[in-house]
Image (spheres, rainbow, N blue to C red):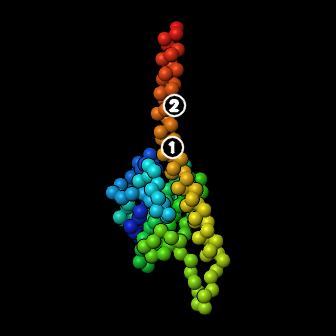
Amino acid sequence: MGDRCYSTLVCAERDKDVFEKMGYRLEESQALSADGNEIPRAVVMVDEEANNGNYDELTALTGVPFLVCNGSCSGAYGDHLIVSDGKEWHYSEALHESNYPAVRVEFRGVIQDSEVDDARKYWTVYAAVVAAIKRAALHRASPKLNETSSTEQNSHRASTN
């Protein structure tokens, strides 16, 4: 058994089964973006004992957009964030109990450019993830329309023959 932490995840509703297989369960809360707006057709899931924050499984996953905020595991790792738009993923250390990337301010106020660059990269991928989850909600509605129109076309062909 590895080091465990509390993990909170946001994904498209259509993808929840993928994460349930990893040990996540649905949480009764609203999926909100960093600006406080609801992410349509997104769900919040939690894994209260995520083995190593499900790091290996999450970073290996492709084709599924998600946002993850993992708590710390004493002596192993600190709070951290993982985001993936389904093609690209990014890991950032996080402020304690926060979904914001951490930027260290060293003694005498020195801030490393790499820390700021990491935070910017996080927000870039984060924006792509939110957009991908929103697109997934739109595409979920689309197949029903396409199925109806193809059924109507098939019915129309059948009645003309």
Residue 129 screen position, x and y as percent: 54, 56
Residue at x-position 46% and y-position 33%: 144
Task: Specify few, some or many for label 1: CA neighbours under 10 Å numbering under 14, 14-19, or 20 or more.
Answer: few
Q: Which residue is mark 1?
A: 138
- Relative horizontal placement of residue 115, taking residue 9 as reference (left or right): right
- Relative horizontal placement of residue 14, taking residue 83 as reference (left or right): left
Residue 139 screen position, x and y as percent: 51, 41
The answer for how far apart the CA atoms under marks 2 and 1 are is 13 Å
- Relative horizontal placement of residue 72, taking residue 153 as reference (left or right): left
Query: Which label's residue is closer to the chain start, 2 or 1?
Result: 1
Residue 51 screen position, x and y as percent: 41, 64
Residue furthest to the bottom in view is 108
Residue 147 screen position, x and y as percent: 48, 29
**Image disc number at residue 154:** none
Residue at x-position 38% and y-position 67%: 6
Q: Label 1's element?
A: helix
Can residue 68 be seen by looking at this rendering?
A: no
Residue at x-position 66% and y-position 77%: 113
Q: Which residue is mark 2?
A: 146
Can residue 102 be seen by looking at this rendering?
A: yes
Residue furthest to the top in view is 161
Residue at x-position 50% and y-position 72%: 94
